[in-house]
């Protein structure tokens, strides 16, 4: 009896082991003479992201895809993807922070690549739970952050050689632009106030950790309100105390923004060095704040606008 019980235990153990093995993912057998690492690599090859019908969310992501020469994969883009001009011919699935999952999924994409910070979260949850792969690109407002974006997009599109070449080109261009900006002595650097909006006399300005803060520093200037993170409404006293030499704003191009004369008419602005000298700079928002392949150009343009030349 004891022997019979042992035989039964062995048989049950064999059945359990067989079931566990059957549950393992199937991996193709390696050709003769090839090792296990090859098998794993071949299996991973089968799972590459299908980007044949791609939706890009984020102007920087779309620019990188075009810069890599892979725009033929794109079937739609978000509202912020306005460069290059050819991108405007693609269907628009909405603003990156107010995405409609239904609109995106209606395009029948094989994959979605979105910059970090896209939303709202409810929409992302729907997209991530759908059968379409949803991939995120990290977003940091630094030189290395741009390189990381290119690397991530290149990896997702499976074009490592193109990504390597673009990273080297963009990195060298940014390094040269920043090196030129850093030649200016610290004591001569101007204070820049980036105003996101000025509706009804309410100034919303950029603190630290923002794209505006990042590009101001790369351009060899000082953020006039670097004491708080993110964007924040400023009191009249805070604006006067900031003593900006220059006011920087996005050039919206739709006529809906605050006009220079209206901005300069505000008492708090008029009392600053920027107000006294009517020093207001407006630049294309995506070019200025996109932190994509054209950032070196934005750094040079901003530096020239602040200091002349």
Image: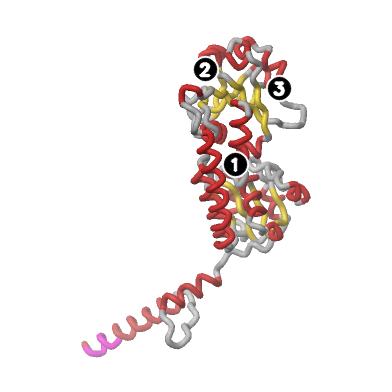
Q: Position of residue 273 (x, y in %)?
A: 58, 14
Q: Position of residue 261 (x, y in %)?
A: 72, 16
Q: Which one is earlier in the sequence, the residue at label 3 or at label 2?
A: 2
Residue 162 figure quarter:
bottom right
Which one is nearer the viewer's eye here, 57 or 186?
Answer: 186
Find residue 190 and name its label.
none
Q: Which residue is mark 1?
A: 295
Report the side of 57 relative to 1 (left or right).
Answer: right
Nearest to the eye among marks 3 and 1: give it.
1
> Residue at left 57%, top 23%?
193
Q: Which one is earlier in the sequence, the residue at label 3 or at label 1?
A: 3
> Residue at left 71%, top 19%?
260
> Residue at left 61%, top 47%?
293
Q: Which residue is mark 3?
A: 258
Q: For the residue labelled by badge 3, is the local secondary structure a helix, a strand or a loop?
A: loop
Q: What segment is highlighted magenta in the picture?
A: 3-8
How far apart, in angstroms, are the residues tagged by discs 3 and 1?
25 Å
How far apart, in angstroms, are the residues tagged by discs 1 and 2?
26 Å
Which one is nearer the viewer's eye here, 223 or 97?
Answer: 223
Specify whether residue 138 is in view.
yes
Q: Position of residue 190 (x, y in %)?
A: 53, 23
Q: For the residue labelled by badge 2, is the local secondary structure a helix, a strand or a loop?
A: helix
């Amino acid at each position: 009896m004891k022997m019979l019980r042992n035989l039964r235990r062995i048989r049950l153990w064999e059945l359990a082991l067989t079931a566990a093995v059957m549950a393992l993912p199937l991996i193709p057998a390696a050709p003769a003479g090839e090792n296990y690492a090859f098998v794993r690599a071949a299996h991973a090859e089968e799972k590459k992201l299908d980007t044949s019908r791609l939706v890009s969310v984020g102007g920087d992501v779309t620019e990188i895809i075009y810069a890599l020469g892979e725009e033929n994969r794109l079937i739609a883009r978000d509202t912020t993807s306005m460069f290059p001009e050819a991108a405007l011919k693609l269907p628009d699935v909405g603003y990156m922070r107010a995405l409609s999952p239904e609109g995106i999924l209606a395009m029948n994409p094989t994959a979605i690549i979105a910059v970090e910070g896209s939303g709202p979260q409810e929409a992302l949850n729907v997209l991530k739970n759908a059968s379409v792969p949803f991939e995120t690109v990290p977003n940091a407002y630094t030189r290395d952050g741009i390189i990381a974006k290119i690397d991530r997009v290149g990896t997702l599109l499976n074009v490592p050689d193109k990504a390597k070449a673009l990273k080297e080109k963009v990195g060298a261009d940014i390094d040269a632009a920043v090196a030129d900006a850093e030649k200016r002595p610290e004591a001569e650097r101007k204070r820049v106030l980036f105003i996101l909006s000025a509706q009804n006399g309410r100034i919303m300005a950029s603190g630290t950790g923002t794209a505006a803060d990042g590009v101001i520093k790369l351009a060899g200037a000082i953020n006039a309100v670097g004491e708080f993170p993110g964007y924040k409404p400023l009191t009249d006293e805070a604006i006067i105390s900031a003593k900006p030499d220059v006011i920087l704003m996005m050039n919206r191009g739709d006529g809906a923004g605050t006009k220079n004369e209206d901005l300069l008419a505000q008492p708090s602005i008029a009392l600053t060095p920027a107000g006294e000298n009517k020093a207001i700079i407006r630049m294309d928002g995506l070019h200025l704040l996109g932190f994509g392949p054209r950032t070196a150009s934005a750094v040079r343009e901003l530096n020239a606008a602040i200091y002349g030349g």
